[in-house]
Image (cartoon, grey):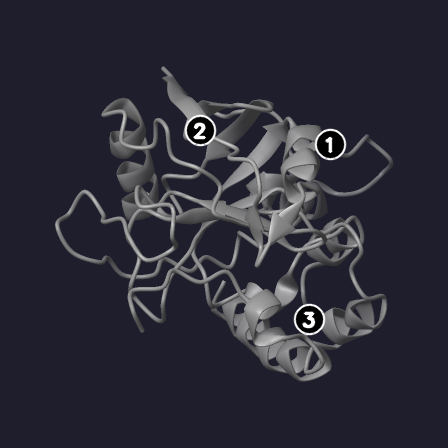
Amino acid sequence: MKKRLLAVLTILLLVLTACGTNTEDSAEPSESNGTDSSESNGTDSSESNETEAVQSSLPQLSEEVSNNEKLVEMTTSLGVIKMKLFPEQAPKAVENFITHSKDGYYEGIIFHRVIQDFMIQTGDPQGTGMGGESIFGEPFEDEFSSDLFHFRGALAMANSGANTNGSQFFIVQNKNLDPSLTKQMQDAEYPDEAVTAYEAGGTPWLDGKHTVFGQVIEGMDIVDEIAAAEAENDKPLEDIVIEKITVIE
C-alpha cells in the first residue's frame, strides 16, 4: 500500500507538469476562504486470492454497495445522483458529509462552480465558494488513500490547501483524459485497474491533493448536464440546487 501511495504522489508531479497549459481556474477545485471475478482456469489459489485482493482494494470500480460502504441519494433541481461513500478510507470526510446531509445543511445550496470536462462543485451555503464549515467546528485533515482515485464520477472534498476541508465538495465530470497521461501512469506503477478506469475519464493530477470519499454509481447523466450548464465565470446563470441529500440506511 505504501508503494501504491508513493506511485500516486509520483504521478501527481508528472501530471501537473503535463497539464502546465491549464489555467489556474480550471486546474483544481478550490474552496476559497479569502485566500471480474476470476473463473477457474488452472490458476493456483494464491494467484486467485491476489487478484481478488487487488480488485477489492479499488472499491470505486464496483457499482455495488458493500457492507462497509454507505449509500446516499442527492436530489438536485435537474435530477437524482446516487453515490456510495467509503468510510474505511476517509472516515472524517464521510462522517462530515453524512452528518451535514442528515441535518439538512446542504438543502437549498447551489452548484456555484461548474466546468465542462472537469468537475462540478457545491457545498457552500453562501454560494460564492468562500463559505461553509465542517461539523467539527474547524477544518479537518486530508485523508488520502492508495485505494481511491479521481476517476470520472469521484466525489471529493474541495479545499483551499492542505488540511483545510470544510463542507464544500465536488464530483469529477471529465470524460476526455489526455491519452498521453496513460503512459505516465503506467510508468509511475499505477494499478492496471486504475489506469484502465482512467481511460473513461478523470483528473489524475488531483490524486494526493484532494480527499476522495465517494463515487457516483447512478446519475452521471445528471452530472454531465450540470457541467454543461450555461455559466459566467464558471457559475451557472440559472441556479442548480441541491434539494435534499438522503442517507440510505
Residue at image location 50% in from the left, 31% down from the top:
84
Q: Earlier in the sequence, mark 2 or mark 3?
A: 3
**Whole-Å distance between the Cαs marked 2 and 3?**
38 Å
Most foreground residue, 67 or 230: 230
In the image, what residue occupies the spot 30% across and 41% down? 125
Seen as rendered, the residue at the extreme top is 249
Query: Where is mark 3, residue-wise?
Result: 189
What amino acid is labelled 2 in the image?
A: Ile
From the viewer's perspective, is residue 97 above or below residue 108? below
| Cα distance between the residues tagged 3 and 1 | 23 Å
Q: Secondary structure at mark 1?
A: loop
Residue 61 against residue 247 in the figure, above or below: below
The answer to whether the residue labelled 1 contacts the one labelled 2, judged by CB atoms less than 8 Å apart, is: no
- Relative to 29, is 64 on the left or the right? right
Q: Residue at x 64, y 64 (%)?
A: 204
- Helix or strand or loop: what does disc 2 sit on? strand
Q: Nearer the viewer, residue 96 or 238?
A: 238
Q: Which residue is mark 1?
A: 37
